[in-house]
Image: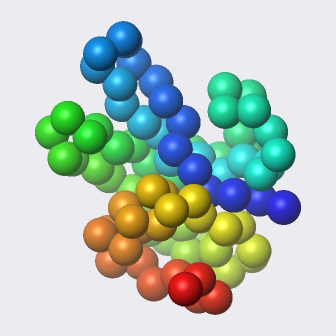
């Protein structure tokens, strides 16, 4: 099963995150299938590829709670997620 989740990058104390599609049971720092955007929680800025997110959600990828919040903020509707 695939999941859309955040992957931590950056220096200590200055973390930023990349939103990626990865196997749900893989480790946090392991390989991922595709990068979908970035999130900077310090400045509350983010940029996501809404077209690719829609594609992966339609094909069965399930976003984590935090990723789901950012996806909703970007304006993408998630099907099958409550």
The spot of residue 47 in percent (x, y) is 32, 52
> Residue at horizontal 28%, vertical 38%?
40
The spot of residue 10 in percent (x, y) is 39, 18
Name which quarter of the figure residue 2 lies in. Answer: bottom right
Q: In this view, does 60 lie to the left or right of 39?
A: right
As drawn, the residue found furthest toward the left would be 43
**Quadrant location, the N terminus:** bottom right
Q: Is residue 12 left or right of residue 66?
A: left
Q: Which of 80 and 33 is in front in this view?
A: 80
* Residue 52 visible from this viewpoint: no
Q: Is residue 74 above or below residue 18?
A: below
Name the colour scheme.
rainbow
Q: In this view, does 58 lie to the left or right of 54?
A: right
**Quadrant location, the C terminus:** bottom right
The spot of residue 4 in percent (x, y) is 61, 57
Q: In this view, does 16 lie above or below 11?
A: below
Total numbered labels: 0
> Residue at horizontal 75%, vertical 76%?
59
Q: Is residue 56 above or below residue 17?
A: below
Name which quarter of the figure residue 31 lies in. Answer: top right
> Residue at horizontal 55%, vertical 75%?
54
Q: Nearer the viewer, residue 11 or 33?
A: 11
Q: Is residue 15 left or right of residue 6?
A: left
* Residue 10 visible from this viewpoint: yes
């Amino acid at each position: 099963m695939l999941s859309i989740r955040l992957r931590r990058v950056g220096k200590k104390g200055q973390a930023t995150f990349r939103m990626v599609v990865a196997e749900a049971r893989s480790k946090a720092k392991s390989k991922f299938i595709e990068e979908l955007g970035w999130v900077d929680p310090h400045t509350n800025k983010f940029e996501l590829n809404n077209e690719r997110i829609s594609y992966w959600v339609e094909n069965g990828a399930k976003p984590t709670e935090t990723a789901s919040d950012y996806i909703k903020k970007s304006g993408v509707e998630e099907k099958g997620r409550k």
